[in-house]
Image (tube, helix red, strand yellow):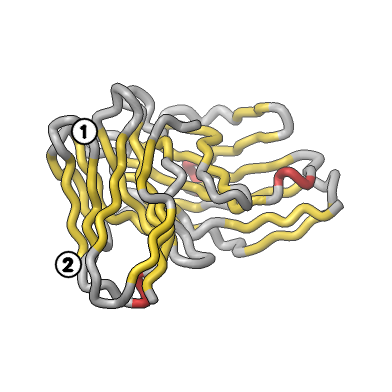
Amino acid sequence: DSGVTQTPKHLITATGQRVTLRCSPRSGDLSVYWYQQSLDQGLQFLIQYYNGEERAKGNILERFSAQQFPDLHSELNLSSLELGDSALYFCASRHGGTGELFFGEGSRLTVL
Amino acid sequence: AQKVTQAQTEISVVEKEDVTLDCVYETRDTTYYLFWYKQPPSGELVFLIRRNSFDEQNEISGRYSWNFQKSTSSFNFTITASQVVDSAVYFCALSDATGGFKTIFGAGTRLFVKA
């Protein structure tokens, strides 16, 4: 157990819809990272937050947005969903002193 | 810009063989971190090792060893006497060490270890 909690674990929805993925970081970690892993693909960096502020942005589509709340949990919002958005979405929190990431179990999104 | 290249898409070995997974990185930063993560068939991502840019000492942990060479921008991972349980996708990652600690991953190498 990494200590990072992601919900929901599985989500099936239709094209054009909007979903929200939620992440709670490990206790004491201030950073949250979001990654997308499509089938048999690597981990694509989407966005990173530190203590409520956006720190870095990767290849995140304009249809996607995220935020980190005062209690440090984060939400990734995906809208106008397309078939190609089907993927495993991972959240990670970063160990403050040494930089390694601890990942949640992922949220598997299927867009039909 | 930062980049991590894992040129080996898939590797298949027989149990007890040694195997090396290659990782080449690009960065303009002088201070950075390198990592390896393992993703077994169950899907979770597990941290294996971290190395900072000032520490080129090789590291050994049981059957695992890592070779960091700044001169060739490589951070290779060797599994000695591979076992079936080593079958997984292995990711190399690079993080800047100042400011945001943005972390990017290579495409991963899928390792099959056959009994």
Chain of residue at mark 2: A
Q: Is residue A95 above or below residue B34?
A: above
- In the picture of the structure, the residue carrying the numbered disc 2 is A62
- In the picture of the structure, the residue carrying the numbered disc 1 is A72
Q: CA distance from mark 2 to mark 1?
A: 23 Å
Tell me if I can see residue B29 in this picture. no
Q: Amino acid at mark 1?
A: Leu
- Measured as percent of width and height from the top left, residue A88 is found at 43, 58
Tell me if I can see residue B40 in this picture. yes
Disc 2: CA contacts within 10 A as few (<14), some (14-19) or many (>=20): few
| Residue at (24% x, 30% y) in the render | A30
Near-viewer residue (A100 or B7): A100
Quadrant of the image occupied by residue A71: top left
- Measured as percent of width and height from the top left, residue A79 is found at 21, 67
| Residue at (39% x, 66% y) in the render | A12
Residue B89 falls left or right of residue B4: right
Q: Are marks 2 and 1 in contact (CB under 8 Å)?
A: no
- Measured as percent of width and height from the top left, residue B40 is found at 61, 48
Q: Tell me the SS state at disc 2.
A: loop
Quadrant of the image occupied by residue B103: top left
Chain of residue at mark 1: A
Which mark is drawn over residue A11?
A: none
- Measured as percent of width and height from the top left, residue A90 is found at 39, 50
Near-viewer residue (A67 or A19): A19
Query: Which mark is in front, 2 or 1?
Result: 1
Q: Quadrant of the C terminus of chain A?
A: bottom left
Quadrant of the image occupied by residue A72: top left
Near-viewer residue (A30 or A11): A11
Callouts 2 and 1 on one subunit: yes
Q: Tell me the SS state at disc 1.
A: loop
| Residue at (31% x, 49% y) in the render | A34
| Residue at (20% x, 36% y) in the render | A50
